[in-house]
Amino acid sequence: MQLLQNTSLKNYNTFGIKVKAKYFVAVSSIKALRDVLTLKGYPNKLLLGGGSNMLLTQDQNKLVIHINIKGISIEQEHNDFVLVRANAGENWHEFVLWCLKHDFGGLENLSLIPGNVGTAPIQNIGAYGVELKDTFVSCNAIHIKTLKEATFNKNECNFGYRNSIFKNEEKGKYIITSVLFKLTKKNHKLHIDYGAITSQLKAQNINNPTIQDVSKAVIAIRESKLPDPKLIGNSGSFFKNPVISKTKFKNLQDNFKDIPSYPVSKNEVKVPAGWLIEKAGFKGKRFGKYGVHKNQALVLVNYGGAEGSDILKLSKLIQKTVLRLFDISIEAEVNIL
C-alpha cells in the first residue's frame, strides 16, 4: 500500500477529466482497505472504482481510495443454478464474460456496461430489460467508521430504477467489497424483446439464441451507439429516463405524436431521455472540446481537453431546455463531484 500525493485522476475516470487527488491510494485487499480507513489526518475520503459513473469538476482535496480488490469464486453449485461471488475491483464486463465462458446465465444483457462490480449495486445497473437486482443475492460491505463487515440481502438494498439504499439511507457509510449472484446453469431465461436485440439476432440469422449470442448482440448494439471511453471520454448514459404519469404522457402526445414510452405501472410510463434530448436539438451538437454524441443523445462526451465544469454546464443547459419544451425534468445519472 503506497500513499501518493497530487496524483492525476485522468486515467481513473472514463470522462478523462484532468483533475488531481491531493492524496491517493489503491487497495487490493480488505485488510489494506481497513488499514487505509484507520489512517489519521485524512477526514475527507473519496471512493473510486472504475470511474465510470462520475463527473469530476474540480481537484479532489481529499484522500482518494481506489478499490482494486480482485477475485471471482463459485460459492455454491446446484443442478440448475450457481452462486458466484465477484470482488469489488473486478471489471464488470470482464466478469460478465467470465460467467458466459462458464455458461452461467443472467448477466448477458448487461454486457459492456462500464465500471466495476463493487459500484454496480449502488446504481442497480441495467440495460435491455434486465437490472442487476434480477440476479443479485447479497453484497458484503465495510462500514467506513466502525470498520465492521455487513451483509445486505436483496430486500435490504431497496433497489429501484438506478437506485439503492447506498444512494439514500446508507449513502457514504459503506464500501462494497464483494457481490454474490445467483445465475442459471441451464434453461436460461432469455430477455430478447427489449430494444434492438431481436432485430440484431435476426440480422445474424440466429433463431435459437444462446446467452452468448444475446451478449454478442448487446455488445454490437452498444458499440454502434456508444463511444468507447478509451477513445472518447464519456460515462455512458448521463441522464436517467424520466417516469411520468400516463395523463401527462397523453397530453404530450397531442403535440408529439411519435413520443415513445415504456410501461412502469398502472398510472406511469417511462419516456426515453435520449428521445427528449434529440428532439430538443442536442444530438451530435459539439461545443469545441465537448458535446453530445452523434449516435446517442444520452451520452455527453469529452473530445479531449474539456473540463468537468464544461460537461456540467452542458448538462444543465440540456435539462433546462427539455424542461422548457416538454415540462419534464431529467435527472443526471452520474455522480457530480
Image: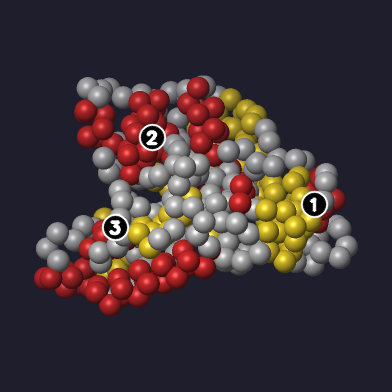
Say which quarter of the image contains residue 251: bottom left
Q: Secondary structure at mark 3?
A: loop
Q: Nearer the viewer, residue 313 or 92?
A: 313
Residue 13: % across, % down: 58, 51
The three-letter code of the residue at mark 2 reads: Ile
The three-letter code of the residue at mark 3 reads: Lys
Q: CA distance from mark 3 to mark 2?
A: 22 Å
**Which of disc 2 and disc 3 is earlier in sequence?**
2
Q: CA distance from mark 3 to mark 1?
A: 40 Å
Residue behind mark 1? 4
Q: Is residue 126 left or right of residue 193?
A: right
Up-down relation of residue 326 to residue 14 (above or below): below
Mark 1 residue crowding within 10 angstroms, few (<14) / some (14–19) / many (20+): some
Q: CA distance from mark 1 to mark 2?
A: 37 Å
The three-letter code of the residue at mark 1 reads: Leu
Q: Secondary structure at mark 2?
A: helix
Residue 221: % across, % down: 32, 38
Q: Are marks 1 and 2 in contact (CB under 8 Å)?
A: no
Up-down relation of residue 59 to residue 323 (above or below): above
Seen at 12% across and 71% down, the residue is 255
Mark 2 residue crowding within 10 angstroms, few (<14) / some (14–19) / many (20+): some
Q: Is residue 111 left or right of residue 190?
A: right
Q: Which mark is residue 219?
A: 2
Q: Is residue 260 left or right of residue 182?
A: left
